[in-house]
Amino acid sequence: MIVTTGANAEAVEALGAATEALRKYGQKKAADLAETRFHAADSGGAVVFVGEVKRGKSTLVNALLGRSLAPVGVDITTSASVWFTPPDETLAAGSARLDFPDSNRRIPLAELPDWVTMAGRHVQDPTIDALPTEAVVAADPLHLPGLTLVDTPGAGGLDPRHARLALTAARRAGAIVMVCDSAAPLTAPEIEFLRTATETSGSVVVAMTKIDKNRRNWRTIAEENRAIVRSQLGRTATVIGVSGSRALAALEQSPADREEILAASGILALRDAINELLEHGEISPKLDGLQVCRSGMHRMKTRLDTEIAVVQGDSSALDDLNEKKARLKELRDHGTEWDQHLSRDITLGRQRATAQLERDLARVKEDWTARINSEGWRMLRKQPQVFTAAITSDLQAASARAFDNFASALHEVVTQLFGSDEQWEDIMNSVAATLVAEDINSPQVQKKWKDVVDPSAMMMGFMGANLLTGGMVGSAIFGSLAMAAVLPIGLVAGGVWLSVNLGYRAMRNGRQHLITWLRETLQLTSKSTLRVIERTVATARPEIVVAYRRHLRAQTEEISEQINAGAEAAKEDKVTRDKRVRGLTRRQTEIVSLIEQLDAAITGLKKAGITP
């Protein structure tokens, strides 16, 4: 999607030259980490479509897909998120998959409306115990190749939780398309949604649909909407008029007429706006990769500066090395100070995360208790999948925020201890490898969940967290660069998401069962999240200790080599010493040049926003 020209090409070139030098001089780990982070930007993104009912979301999705795959119609309202994702080895083109908490099921594409629309045959069936949390259709969008398009539940209106849930599950840079009608200015709920969305993501575009039915006034409405956003939110917004039906009709025309009709439909302008949002979202990982490179190069330059000074007979440089060696030996031999500080900092981070989780879950309990009492359980029963998506998003957000709070504190500890975060990935990979869901099928749990849920079914969720999204998300959890932020979403959500879906039974049994179910689900979320944090502590702390002792040993050996090099140089004649200095200086000049190249590439990316 992005052509490697301009600033982007300079960044790729700088990365290649710097990582080659890092490997050449023994810094393979830094080189590998830099490349991994830099190229994380190359993965496809998710585009999430949100909007009030009957605004034309599904028609717009079909227009970008280039064929009618999303269920549409006057009386059809999407009741579950539908993902349109490029085909792969797990899902062939034109096939569909329903994702349930404990399993997934392949279905003919023609049966999709039965499962994901408000009037769907299975959605209306009172004997169905669980409905899919989402559906996945293998289809590569014609106008946005390589991307995933997510059609969120129309019955949920403009609920930010649906967009948050989809973007979180995507695990990639994404954009939000808010779909509204071109016949009238933005409504109060739409403005409020924009306010919420732009607080957490600048990647939002407003698509005004059905301009073919409002040809005379839609441009005036669009300008009015821009003014409303400036006035209400204090920022500018990309507002584009589009006709999904005209864009679909254009595909049936001759190639000579097609482009003109597509341009008039606004679909090409929307495509370009989405691509621009995603491209700007890729700046961060590219900059991150370049910064890792720069840190590694800077460490190499610092070492060369010291080696040159020592070979030249600088006594102060030699004294500094001896002091560092003595300090490192003391840390290696005793380690009492840093070990105690490590325990203190990990404990404080865990306490802050626990407090954050308690506050968030208390707020979820208050909000949903009020909603159940005000709307009534009968109303919720009419929109079971909307209810599922909304409360799942709240629980997931609370769990993720707590773990992210703790992981950020742990990351800071590791970075300060080692002087860089190159050890961080190895530590978190070790944590991920040991995290295994616990059995919650105890007599106490069985008693609490009597008449509300089946505890044996709960176990299926914990045993098969990867099944939550049919492998789309679960398979990507381990080894992710953002592992610290996403680990609990798979490991905790296994039971919690299944618990949410078993709320269908509680809905049928009445309001009190639903309130009981809510309380128990919140407790399960808290216990599961804290369990993951405790396991992370149990695994991460010894990993940090072992890695730091290894780090101290390596540092000591490096300093010893520098001291020995100085001692050898003192025995050499001036000609030999000068020759050695010239060799070190040439390497130093090479490193300085690469640092300057990295700095230029970083500045270029920031200015150009990697727009091709």
Image (spheres, rainbow, N blue to C red):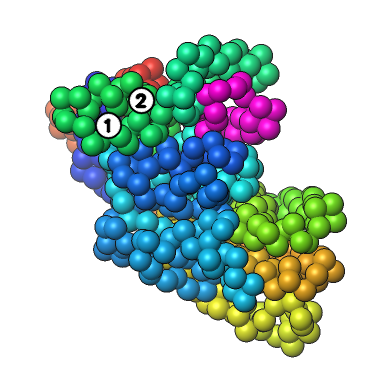
Instruction: Report if residue 7 is visible in the image.
Output: yes
Residue 250's tag is 1
- Placement of 182 over or under 297, stated as above or below: above
Q: Residues within 10 Å of mark 1 (few under 14, many from 20)?
A: many
Instruction: Report if residue 536 is visible in the image.
Output: no
* Residue for badge 2: 265
> Quadrant of residue 147 in the image?
top left
Is residue 194 located in the magenta-colored stretch of the structure?
yes
- The residue nearer to you, when weighing 161 against 310, is 161
Specify the quadrant that holds the N terminus. top left
Q: In the rendering, at what x and y percent does residue 233 appear?
A: 65, 20
Dot placed on the residue nearer the N-terminal end, 1 or 2: 1
Q: Residues within 10 Å of mark 2 (few under 14, many from 20)?
A: many
Badge 1 element: helix
Is residue 321 located in the magenta-colored stretch of the structure?
no
- The residue nearer to you, when weighing 523 against 75, is 75
Q: Is residue 418 left or right of residue 504?
A: left
Q: In the rendering, at what x and y percent does residue 297 appear?
A: 33, 34
Specify the quadrant that holds the C terminus. top left
Identify which residue is drawn at 30% across, 34% down. Answer: 249
Identify which residue is drawn at 56% across, 73% down. Answer: 461
Q: Amino acid at mark 1?
A: Ala
Q: In the rendering, at what x and y percent does residue 470 appear?
A: 43, 65
